[in-house]
Amino acid sequence: MEFFERFAIPHPSPAIYASMVVIALTVVAIIAGLTYFKKWGYLWREWLTTVDHKRLGLMYIISAILMLFRGGVDAIMMRAQLATPDSKLLDAQHYNEIFTTHGVVMIMFMAMPFIFGFMNYIVPLQIGARDVAFPRLNAISFWLFFMGAMLFNISFVIGGSPDAGWTSYFPLAGTDFSESVGTNYYMIALQISGLGSLMTGINMITTILKMRAPGMTLMKMPMFTWSTLVANLIIVTVFPVLTVALAMGTMDRLFATNFFTSSNGGMDMLWANLFWVWGHPEVYILILPAFGIYSEIISTFSSKNLYGYTSMVASMVIISVLSCLVWAHHFFTMGQGAASNSFFSITTMAIAVPTGVKIFNWLFTMWKGKIRFTVPMLYSIGFIPLFTIGGVTGVMLAMSAADYQYHNTMFLVAHFHNTIIPGVVFAMLAGLTYYWPKMFGFMLNERIGKWTFWALSIGFVLAFFPMYITGLDGQARRMYTYSESTGFGPLNMLSFIGAGIMAIGFVLIVYNIYYSIRYAPRNIGSDPWDARTLEWATHTPVPEYNFAITPAVNSIEPFWDAKKKKHVLFPEPLKKIHMPNNSGMPFILSAIFFVWGFSFVFAIWPLLIISTLGIFACLACRSFENDHGHYISLEEIEETEEKLGGAKK
Amino acid sequence: MKELFPAKQVMGFVFSLILTAIALLVYFLDLSFTAGLTILVVTAFIQALLQLVVFMHAGETKDKWAIYGNVYFMILIAMITIFGTLFLFVWDM
C-alpha cells in the first residue's frame, strides 16, 4: 500500500472527497451512457480520429466552455471566502490552491482553447481553404492540449493541486517550500499543452501564408485571419521560452538542479524573468484574436466595411513587436535600477498607442453605420468602454515609480480582469453567438442573450471595480483573509455580489443553449447575419470540404461584393476534391503523453521510460506510414451540394 | 570526378571537428569561468550554423528565404531575451 500513499491528498477536506465521488460517478455515467447508446464506434470514427478543422474547432470550444465553468467555480469560491472579514469558509492552503488553478485554468485551458477553437473553425473558411496546412498535426495539437488540461484537472483529487500561484514563482514553487506534487502537475501539464500550442502556431502560420484562395493577397485577408496570423507568430516566438523555463523548473523540482533555487548559484528571479518573457506576449496572443473577432462583428453589424484596415493591421504588428519588449513591468519592484525600469515603462506605455488606434477605428466603423443591436454587437459595444478603462489602468501600472504602490494589490487584479473579461471573454461569447448558426445551423435566442450580456456586464462592473479601490487602500492579492479593521469588508461583499450576478449570466448561457436547441427555427439559411466575409459563403452545415469550388477573391469582403456588386465568387468548374484521411494516431499519442505526464508528476520512473518509448514508437510509425489522403468524387460532391440546397454561386 | 567529390561536406566535417576540439580545450586548459564559457558559447553557435548550412542543406532549395528567415528570427528573439535579461539582472542591478 505504500506505493499508493503518494496519491493521497496532502490537505483533504469534505469538499474534495465529495468531488472525488462526483468525478467517479461522472466517469461511470459517461462510460455507461456510451455503451448503452452504442456510441463508442461513433465517438471513435467521427470525433476521436477526426482531422477535420471544424470538428477540432468545436472540440476546442466545448473544452473551453467546460473549463470556463471549472475556473468560474474557483472564482466564486474565492469571492465567497473574501466576502466577509476573517472568513472561515476556506483555509489558507485551499485558497492558495484555488487561486492557482483559477489562473492556470482560465488562461491556459479556457482562453487559449477558446481562441484556438475559433482559429480552427473560422480561418480556413475565411481564406477559402479546405483544411489547415497540416491536418494531422492539428489533431495532435488538440489532443495534447486536452490531455494537458485533464492532467492538470485531476490534480485536486490525486496528489493535491499546485498552490504557488499561476505564475508559480520560485523559490516558493521549489521543493523547499512546495513539497507536494502540485507544482509538478503545473510544470508537466503546461509543458504538454504548450507543445500543442506551439504546433498550432506553426500550423496556422503555414495555413495562412500558403493556402489562401486565389486573389486573396495579404492585404485582402479578413481581420480575424490577420489577427490569427499575428497571434500565431507571437506563439512561435515566445512559447519556446516557456518550454525551456518549465523544463528547468521541472529539473529543479525532480532532479535537484539549481536553476531557480536561492542557494548554490541558483537565481530565483530568473524564473519570473523567463516566465514573463513568455507571459506578457501570451496576453497579446489572447487579446489579438479577440480584437479580430470584434472587428468582424462591428463591421458586420454596422453594415459598413472596417474603418482603417491598413492601420488595423499595422497596429497589430506593432503591438506584437512591443509585446516582446515589456516583460519586466511584471516585476518592477525586484530591485533593478532606474534605467531598466524606465525602458520597460516606456515600451509598456507605447503599447497604448496602437491599441488606441484600434479603439478609434472601431468607433469610426460604427460612425454613421446602420447599427443592428444584436447580442454579438452588444458585447462588442460593451467591450469598447470597459476595455478602455482596463487599458488606462494598465498605463497607470506601467509607470514603474507608481507601480511600487500598486504592485501585488487588488488594483492589479482589477486591472487584468478588466482587460481579460471585456477583452477576451466578451469576445469569445460574442464570437460564439455570432458563429453559432454557422456551427450548428440555428441561432441562439437573442432575448436570453441580451439578458446574459447585461448580467455579465453589470456583474463584471460590480465584481471588479471595487477592487481598484481596495487595492489602492492596500488590500494585497492572494491573501486568503483580512481583518475587519482594514475596512475592506463592504467593498469585498459588493465584489461577491457582482461575482454572483456574473454566475447567473453563465447559467443563462447554458439555459440559452438548451432553449435554442429546443425552440430555435432551423430554416435560417447560410447567412443569417447578412455578413461580409467568405466563411458565410458556404453552406450551413459546412460540408466536409468547406467549398465545393475554391472561391475567387477580389477584395477584403468578397462575399459582400458577391451579394451587392455582382462579383462572381465561384468561377471555376467543379473538380474532385482531395482531403486528408482520419487517423487515430494523434489521440493515441496524446493518451500516451498523459501517462507520461502522470508518471513524471509522481516520479514513477519505469512507467515514464515505457511511455517515452511509446511516444517514440508513435513517431516512428508515422514516419513509415504511407498516407496520401483520399478524393471525394464529383458525384459525391454534387449529391452533397444538392442535399444542402443546391450549389452556391 | 571532381564534381562528385563532396568537398563542401568534407571541409565542413573537418571544420566541425576543429570546433569540437576547441570546445574540448576548455576542459583541459585552466581558463577562467568567463573565458571558458565564452569559448563554449561561440563555438556552439558556429557549430550549429555549420550543421544547418552544410549538413542540413539550408539554402540549397527554393524555400531558402523561409529557412534563413526562421534562423534570423530565432537569433533576434534569443538576443532580445538574453540581452533583456542581462540588462535587468547584471548591468542594471
Image (tube, coloured by chain):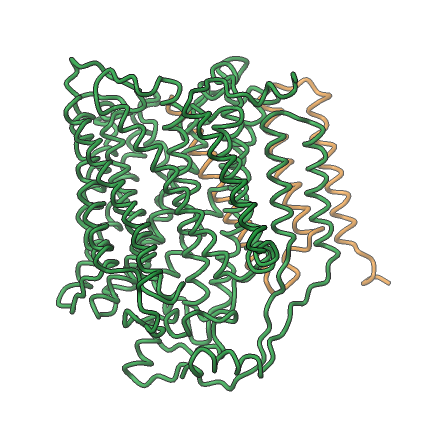
Q: Name which residue lies at 49% across and 48% down.
A: A236
Q: Looking at the picture, how far across and down is residue A42, in whole percent? A: 58, 59
Residue at the front extreme, as displayed: A36
Q: Is residue B90 visible?
A: no
Q: Is residue A172 visible?
A: yes
- State which quarter of the image contains the N terminus of chain A: top right
Residues A103 and B77: in front is A103
Q: Looking at the picture, how far across and down is residue A131, in whole percent? A: 52, 65
Quick check: A166 left or right of A306?
A: right
Q: Looking at the picture, how far across and down is residue A206, in whole percent? A: 52, 60
Splitting the image into 4 quarters, where does residue B93 fall? top left
Q: Name which residue lies at 73% across and 45% down.
A: A617
Splitting the image into 4 quarters, where does residue A362 fall? bottom left
User: In the rendered picture of this protein, how many numbered marks are placed on residues?
Assistant: 0
Compared with A417, A89 (above or below) is above
Q: Looking at the picture, how far across and down is residue A164, in whole percent? A: 42, 23
Identify the hue of chain A.
green
Chain painted in orange in the figure: B
Residue at the left extreme, as displayed: A368
Compared with A569, A323 (above or below) is above
Compared with A56, A563 (above or below) is below
- State which quarter of the image contains the C terminus of chain A: bottom left
Residues A198 and A541: in front is A541
Quick check: B78 left or right of A280?
A: right
Quick check: A166 left or right of A446?
A: right
